[in-house]
Amino acid sequence: MTRTTRRRPVRLAVMLAAVSAVAAGAAVALASGAEAGTTLGASAAEKGRYFGTAVAAGKLSNSQYTTILDREFNMITPENEMKWDATEPTQGQFRYTSADQIVSHAQAHGQRMRGHALLWYQQEPGWAQSMSGSALRSAMMNHVSTVAAHYKGKIYAWDVVNEAFADGGGGGRRDSNLQRSTGVYNMVKDFKARGVPIDCVGFQSHLGGLPPSDYQANLQRFADLGVEVQITELDISGSNQATAYANVVKACLAVSRCAGITVWGIRDSDSWRTGENPLLFDSNGNKKAAYTSTLNALNGPGSTVSTPPVSTPPVSSPPPVSTSPSTPGTGTGNGCTATVSLNQWNGGFVATVRVTAGSAAINGWTVGLTLPSGATITGIWNANRSGDSGAVRFTNVSYNGSVGAGQYTEFGFQATGSATGLTPSCS
């Protein structure tokens, strides 16, 4: 339900709380002697934990992808297929085809499912974006109860509210129509004191190097409030990647309430952080040094959880990190307008682009912008793109092309270099 960033320009130690729903099989099955210690999932299971990954339905037809998935991981989180705009694109009309495909794969291969995510500010369907008050609350509750009921008995835990807190260190709630402030830790402490149901806090952990020095202590202080903690969207770039992955695993194993770890993708080519190679397998499906250090850490010392958690975690998508947002440019085109907000640091930036329909609904959109000299896109979410530098063209993906009159959808990208003078056009 929240996140805070701690260092470098990718979402670090991002925390979000989630409330678990009815889970199918709360206990982690222990690995058989033949498998113990030889795969990520089996090694985690020996200590009563899970080791999972984010999965895209469109990649389940790739044999290399599914071979690694079914060999290594015992928990699955859908990347986008269970989000609000994907499951209820029109109010009251629900669509589960892609999400059901992932659930069916998990059931057929003995993997558990994490539901991700019932409510998230970035992939809110257009019809809900102008709602407020009782109408919005009613729509939210109907969505949550309907989707959760559809998957009753099939989901280990739900990410109910994802990233309710703003980026940066301020601890304030995110400014969206879902929640218009208190810090995450104080909020969870208050919820527990008042009996508000909250079962888990998830740390997204999109890192650009070693985890912060207080990473384990942060896991522990939330666990001490009586909630489980999970590492829910882990990926790590940088030259010390192998050590960083091992340190994150060791931190989780040292906290008895840390239920498990989910990496955000399988191969580097599957990552939203294009060009940063932040995952455990290279683009050809080969195990990297980070895989070996992770497996060794899982097989090392650590507390054992006999009955693991029933809870949470990104996104899949990458929100910003440092400075306050600004709006450098607005472009109006044929029936739509595009605006850009930025979070910048020395050497890079994250841009969030909002595409707003005019007086009539649109079915498909294209956004063009020219990056300054030296700027290069390294990751993208919620859009397709043509080009990484210079003149770049973005188009909608399958779930966000239809935008109602006066409504909007958003996509984003991360890049190196400067964001000076970004002015989008929309058609």
Image: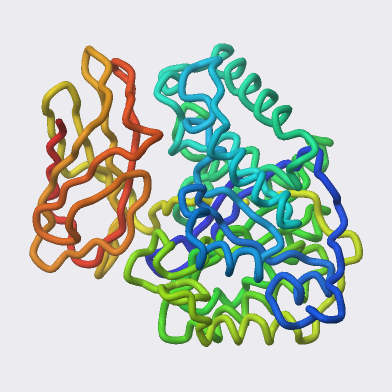
Nearer to us in this view, 13 or 279: 279
Image position, residue 135 (x, y; %): 55, 12
Name the residue located 52 percent from the left edge and 29 percent from the top edge: 178
Image position, residue 276 (x, y; %): 36, 72
Q: Quadrant of the N terminus?
A: top right
- Outermost residue to the right: 306
Q: Quadrant of the C terminus?
A: top left
Q: Answer with the quarter of the image where residue 111 lies.
A: bottom right
Image position, residue 89 (x, y; %): 46, 24
Q: Is residue 370 above or below residue 92?
A: below
Name the residue located 53 percent from the left edge and 51 percent from the top edge: 314
Q: Is residue 353 left or right of residue 73?
A: left
Q: Is residue 150 left or right of residue 414?
A: right
Query: By what rule are the colours in the image chosen?
Result: rainbow
Image position, residue 245 (x, y; %): 57, 78
Q: Is residue 302 above or below residue 266?
A: below
Q: Is residue 225 left or right of residue 164?
A: right
Q: Answer with the quarter of the image where residue 262 lies.
A: bottom right
Nearer to us in this view, 22 or 99: 99
Q: So how many labels did they put on this image?
A: 0
Q: Is residue 207 left or right of residue 203?
A: left
Nearer to us in this view, 57 or 77: 57
Name the residue located 44 percent from the left edge and 27 percent from the top edge: 125
